[in-house]
Image (tube, helix red, strand yellow):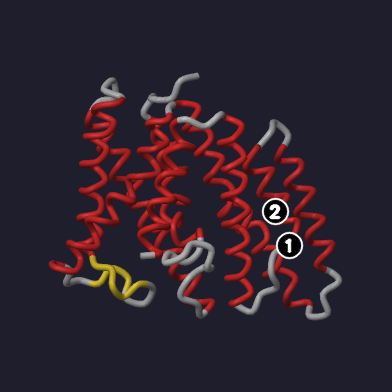
């Protein structure tokens, strides 16, 4: 029951933020999502026996999320400061893994929400499509995988996933895109919708597997316990972290983004 109630609450909040919230409220939500994802990523890093990334990663992530004109300078300075701060470690073999995790975490947890903000500026429907394509795909993959799944997709990382389920997931995302964008943004050619949906879905599935690999390496089942019945925030948005930037790149590449 907790899982169902949590899902209903998440859907309601997502719909409000995507379609009706003020741009600054949506930006604030993007910052919050980045912070929550980074917090859970830090815990998983600790499970690998690596020092938890600290404040430099959060600052780096915020730079990535807002990405002003001179952000690269700020990021470079943060890398140098993080290295300098890591010199205090007694075990010098921890220096490189710690600094690497700091900035991997920054990009992994924050950068996708930069593209969520950019997609919303283009169209709330493009953003909702980018967020929902893996939700729809995962639902179809679950049922197809259970009934028809024979060939394991990634037996070490995620033993229950199958190639049959993965292909059904792609098909489900394409169908969702053709129906949803075909109705709300009919100016987009169906073939472009199908391309965006298919490639972004594959990216999302890779995102799901990537988070599963991190969790298995850390020896945990969930990234956190923030969401009753669902685990952590990363467990809910792992696909979106990969799908959002890919969807944005494809939308720009196919000439669908306004200036």
Say if 205 sits above or below 181 in the image: below
Q: Where on the picture, by quarter, is residue 3?
A: bottom left
In the image, farthest residue toward the left: 148
Residue at image position (63%, 61%) is 39
- Label 1 residue SS: loop
Residue 152, image x, y percentages: 25, 72
Image position of 181 with respect to 237: above or below? above
User: Which residue is pictured at 56% across the width and 29% down the height?
Assistant: 22
Above or below: residue 81 compared with residue 91: above
Left or right: 254 as drawn, with respect to 231: left
In-front residue for pair 194/27? 27
Q: Are marks 1 and 2 in contact (CB under 8 Å)?
A: yes
In-front residue for pair 32/217 = 32
- SS assignment at label 2: helix
- Cα separation between marks 1 and 2: 7 Å
Image point (42%, 44%), residue name:
12
Residue 36 place in picture, x, y as percent = 59, 56
> Seen in the image, is 129 located left or right of residue 38?
left
Question: Residue 55, image x and y in percent?
Answer: 75, 57
Rate crowding at label 1 as few (under 14), some (14 to 19) or many (20 or more) other CA atoms within 10 Å.
some
For disc 1, the marked residue is: 54
Q: Mark number for residue 58? A: 2
Q: x, y percentage for residue 1? A: 35, 65
- Crowding at dot 2, Cα within 10 Å, few <14 / some 14-19 / many 20+, comes out as many
Mark linked to residue 161: none
Could you tell whether 242 is left or right of 82 in the image? Answer: left
């Amino acid at each position: 029951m907790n899982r169902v109630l949590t899902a209903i609450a998440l859907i309601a909040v997502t719909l409000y933020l995507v379609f009706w919230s003020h741009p600054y409220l949506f930006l604030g939500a993007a910052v919050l999502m980045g912070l929550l994802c980074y917090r859970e990523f830090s815990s998983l890093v600790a499970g690998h026996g690596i020092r938890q990334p600290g404040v430099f990663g959060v600052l780096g992530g915020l730079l990535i999320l807002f990405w002003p004109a001179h952000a690269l300078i700020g990021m470079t300075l943060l890398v140098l400061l993080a290295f300098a701060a890591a010199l205090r470690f007694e075990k010098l073999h921890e220096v490189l893994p710690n600094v690497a995790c700091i900035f991997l975490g920054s990009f992994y947890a924050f950068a996708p929400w930069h593209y969520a903000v950019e997609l919303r500026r283009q169209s709330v429907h493009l953003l909702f499509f980018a967020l929902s394509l893996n939700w729809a795909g995962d639902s179809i993959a679950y049922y197809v995988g259970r009934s028809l799944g024979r060939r394991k997709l990634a037996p070490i990382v995620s033993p229950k996933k199958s190639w049959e389920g993965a292909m059904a997931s792609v098909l489900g995302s394409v169908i969702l895109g053709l129906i949803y964008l075909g109705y709300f943004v009919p100016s987009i050619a169906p073939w472009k919708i199908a391309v965006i949906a298919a490639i972004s879905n594959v990216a999302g599935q890779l995102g799901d597997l990537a988070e599963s690999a991190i969790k298995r390496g850390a020896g945990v089942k969930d990234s956190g316990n923030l969401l009753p019945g669902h685990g952590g925030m990363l467990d809910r948005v792992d696909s979106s972290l990969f799908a959002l930037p890919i969807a944005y790149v494809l939308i720009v590449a196919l000439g669908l983004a306004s200036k």
